[in-house]
């Protein structure tokens, strides 16, 4: 194992130890009085913040590793650009299909009055739904298409 491998192993063990200490501390201090016990609330918040930090660091490392791979491998860079263009096309098509109309449901007035629901939010929620439908449809078509292609091989 090289120098980089040893550093990564040490960092992983340190993250594991911090995570274990936080979880054990939470379990030792756990009780039913979460709203009235500030110490319990503090331990829950500490564990949540740690989880957010781990997710952020992991996502950052994954993105940076992908960018580093794209910078060194031209074929990977081409595939990455094609993937980004495809996702951009899906989002664009979804946005063009989306409606800014605010849906009517019980309690909608509360969201309209406090500003959490407006035409822009409704349009982006609709965009997300259309993108999900498009990607689901493409996944189903590709699975079915591969099955049919195997039959003819």
Image (tube, rainbow, N blue to C red):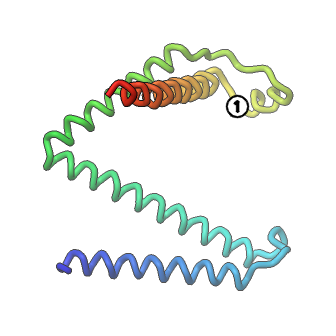
Closer to us: 140 or 47: 140
Q: Position of residue 63 (x, y in %)?
A: 33, 51
User: In which quadrant is the N terminus drawn?
Assistant: bottom left
- Horizontal side of residue 41 vs 131, given as left or right: right
In this picture, is 39 found above or below 140?
below
- Horizontal side of residue 36 vs 6, given as left or right: right
The residue shown at (68%, 70%) is: 44
Q: What SS does tag 1 mark?
A: loop
How many numbered dots are placed on residues in this image? 1
The quarter holding residue 111 reads: top right
Closer to us: 140 or 59: 140
In this picture, is 69 found above or below 108?
below
User: In which quadrant is the C terminus drawn?
Assistant: top left
The residue shown at (56%, 25%) is: 133
The residue shown at (51%, 24%) is: 137
Closer to us: 37 or 20: 20
Q: Position of residue 88 (x, y in %)?
A: 38, 26
Quick one: label 1, few (<14), some, or many (20+) residues within 10 Å? few
Residue at mark 1: 115
The residue shown at (27%, 55%) is: 65
The quarter holding residue 147 reads: top left
Q: Position of residue 151 (x, y in %)?
A: 39, 27
């Amino acid at each position: 194992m090289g120098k980089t491998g040893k550093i990564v192993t040490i960092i992983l063990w340190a993250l594991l130890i911090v995570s274990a200490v936080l979880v054990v501390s939470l379990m030792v201090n756990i009780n039913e009085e979460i709203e009235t016990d500030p110490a319990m609330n503090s331990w829950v918040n500490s564990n949540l913040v740690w989880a957010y930090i781990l997710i952020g660091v992991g996502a950052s490392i994954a993105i940076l590793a992908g960018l580093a791979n794209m910078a060194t491998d031209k074929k990977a860079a081409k595939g990455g650009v094609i993937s980004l263009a495809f996702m951009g096309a899906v989002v664009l098509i979804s946005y063009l299909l989306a409606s800014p109309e605010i849906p009517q449901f019980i309690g909608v007035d509360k969201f309209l009055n406090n500003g959490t629901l407006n035409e822009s939010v409704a349009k982006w929620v609709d965009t997300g739904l259309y993108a999900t439908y498009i990607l689901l449809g493409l996944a189903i078509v590709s699975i079915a298409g591969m099955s049919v292609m195997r039959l003819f091989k």
